[in-house]
Image (cartoon, rainbow, N blue to C red):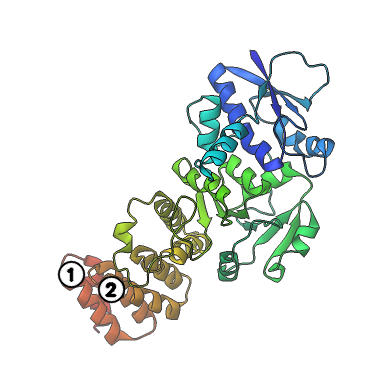
């Protein structure tokens, strides 16, 4: 087996993203990696020092099938090496020229190291975490926040776990009364916890880099800075990423626009928006699998930035009905019908909500309307018959 030597450095999230290049170069060259961690080489200093970074990452990195050896860079290594921090030159040059970043992590790595984008996931762990199985996980570092996070966390219908390797992060989390702390030993245990969870919610920090490397279901809280583009473009390659955007930002290279309340055709206009479609696809997948809390989270993410999206309003109304909140479901379905009054399924679902409240006259009116729009709507006919006696 051919062996290639690589150098990697910090910060920790950058190191994790750099492993994507390491894996793909090894696949291209039919090789395995001797990976050496070091300070310098265009990388930023590790926050807690080189030895601590090596200790924290060792278990995770040696388990990857493309790694032959992982160690601290020796002083006497004379063999040729590939510097996995070389992507920084490309990024810095672009920023110096244009004043902005222009690509996501995957595109940057593929362009810098000349490989074709293939399988997205580049890290795996064999261990599963029973504590986080089926749970929503939250992590939020001390920097890179946006104001929409408060809406997200207060709208969750279950108490998530706040995962960290440092209990001080939990103590400094402003919504800690809404979460349960879960402290793990190192990033291997964090990766295991994220892999086992239903949904990971983080900001632009190393735990979210881990969630990306695992290609877990994830939402990233995007801070309104230029580097947000590193994450937003990943929706081209992963269908499991969604975004918590800062509200009221104009739709430009680095931000998204909140929809106008008067826009009645927002769904049509967004049909080619890959980030919108990605969020919708994730929401549908959770909904079809009866993971209603997760589906609700993603539908609400869409509505936070596209206020009058008929599909998200309609389906959120269905979710709320399935969760037993008929009052909220009624309001959402009425709002959806106010935007699009020609979809028979919406009237059918509102009719079921009225029937669940024993408002049979209103239910009959909705089922009749659904049938007037689609005379072959068998379910609407059956429900009309049920509420007519």
Give the residue drawn at x 62%, y 27%: 22
Q: Nearer the viewer, residue 251 or 240?
A: 251
Q: Secondary structure at mark 1?
A: helix
Q: Nearer the viewer, residue 320 or 40?
A: 40
Residue 231 vertical position relative to residue 171 in the rendered view, above or below: above
Give the residue drawn at x 16%, y 73%: 372
Q: Residue furthest front?
A: 97
Give the residue drawn at x 79%, y 54%: 166
Q: Would residue 85 be seen by someone viewing this image from the given angle? A: yes
Location of mark 1 (residue): 373
Quadrant where the N terminus sits is: top right
Q: Secondary structure at mark 2?
A: helix
Image spot of residue 140 (x, y percent): 67, 57
Give the total of numbered labels.
2
- Which circle's residue, 2 or 1, is located before the other in the chain? 2
Image-based side of 128 in relation to 101, left or right: right
Image spot of residue 26 (x, y percent): 59, 22
The answer for how far apart the CA atoms under marks 2 and 1 are is 10 Å
Q: Are marks 2 and 1 in contact (CB under 8 Å)?
A: yes
Mark sitting on residue 12 = none
Local crowd size for mark 1, using a 10 Å CA cut-off: few (<14), some (14–19), many (≥20): some
Residue 313 quadrant: bottom left
Image spot of residue 377 (x, y percent): 21, 66
Location of mark 2 (residue): 347
Give the residue drawn at x 57%, y 37%: 91
Residue 189 quadrant: top right
């Amino acid at each position: 087996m051919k062996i290639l030597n690589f150098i990697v450095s910090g910060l920790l999230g950058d190191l994790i993203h750099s492993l994507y290049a390491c894996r793909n170069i090894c696949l291209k060259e039919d090789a395995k990696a001797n990976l050496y961690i070091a300070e310098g080489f265009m990388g930023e200093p590790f926050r807690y020092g080189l030895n601590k970074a090596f200790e924290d990452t060792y278990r995770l990195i040696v388990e990857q099938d493309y790694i032959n050896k992982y160690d601290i860079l020796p002083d006497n290594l004379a063999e040729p090496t590939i510097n996995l921090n070389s992507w920084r030159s490309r990024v810095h040059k672009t920023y110096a020229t244009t004043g902005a970043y222009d690509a996501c992590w995957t595109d940057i790595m593929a362009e810098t190291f000349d490989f074709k984008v293939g399988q997205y996931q580049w890290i795996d762990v064999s261990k599963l975490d029973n504590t986080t199985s089926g749970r929503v996980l939250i992590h939020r570092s001390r920097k890179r926040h946006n104001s929409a996070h408060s809406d997200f966390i207060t709208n969750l219908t279950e108490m998530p776990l706040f995962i960290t390797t440092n209990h001080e992060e939990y103590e400094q989390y402003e919504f800690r009364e809404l979460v349960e702390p879960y402290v793990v030993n190192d990033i291997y245990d964090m990766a295991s916890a994220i892999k086992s969870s239903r949904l990971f919610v983080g900001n632009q920090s190393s735990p979210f880099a881990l969630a990306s490397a695992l290609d877990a279901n994830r939402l990233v809280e995007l801070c309104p800075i230029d580097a947000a583009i590193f994450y937003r473009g990943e929706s081209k390659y992963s269908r499991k990423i969604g975004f918590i955007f800062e509200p009221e930002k104009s739709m430009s290279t680095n931000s998204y626009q909140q929809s106008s309340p008067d826009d009645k055709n927002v769904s049509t206009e967004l049909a080619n928006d890959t980030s919108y479609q990605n969020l919708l696809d994730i929401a549908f997948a959770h909904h079809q699998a009866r993971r209603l809390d997760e589906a609700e989270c993603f539908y609400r993410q869409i509505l936070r930035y596209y206020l009058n999206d008929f599909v998200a309003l309609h389906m959120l109304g269905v979710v709320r009905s399935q969760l037993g909140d008929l009052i909220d479901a009624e309001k959402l379905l009425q709002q959806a019908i106010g935007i699009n009054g020609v979809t028979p399924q919406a009237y059918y679902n509102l009719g079921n909500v009225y029937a669940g409240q024993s408002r049979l006259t209103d239910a009959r009116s909705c089922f009749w309307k659904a049938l007037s729009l689609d005379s072959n709507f068998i379910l609407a006919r059956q429900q009309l018959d049920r509420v007519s006696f």
